[in-house]
Amino acid sequence: MALRKLGKDPESPSGGSPTIYLDDVKDTYLVQGFRVEDGQRLSVMDIPGHETVVEIPRHMVQFFLEVKGAEDPHV
């Protein structure tokens, strides 16, 4: 597994979450964030039983490589 940490939330008071990771092997992003438990918000989504929803602040998209303009995942 080639899991690479791309960035933690610079505004996190504890410095621990949310965090964005890249799996170089599967070419997917993994997002550590806040578990969404609000029933009203979840009710408007079609979430299969084997999936979950996490939430991250909007400013965290800066860590996605496509936003940084880095198409090569090894940049």
Image (spheres, rainbow, N blue to C red):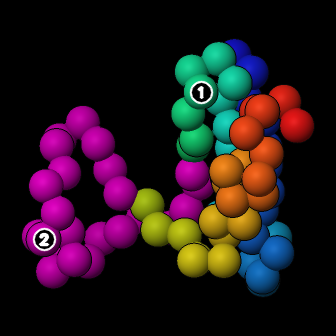
Say above or below: 6 vs 60: above
Say above or below: 58 vs 7: below
Q: CA distance from mark 2 to mark 1?
A: 28 Å
Element marked by disc 2:
loop
Q: Which residue is mark 2?
A: 44
Q: Which mark is residue 27?
A: 1
Q: Amino acid at mark 1?
A: Asp
- Where does the image place residue 13, in percent across and percent down from the top left? 78, 83
* Quadrant assignment, res 32: bottom right
Q: Is residue 49 left or right of residue 24?
A: left
Local crowd size for mark 2, using a 10 Å CA cut-off: few (<14), some (14–19), many (≥20):
few
Give the overall secondary structure of the magenta segment. loop
Q: Which residues are magenta?
A: 31-53
Say above or below: 36 vs 69: below
5 part of magenta stretch: no
* Quadrant assignment, res 49: top left
Mark found first going from the N terminus, 2 or 1: 1
Q: Amino acid at mark 2?
A: Val
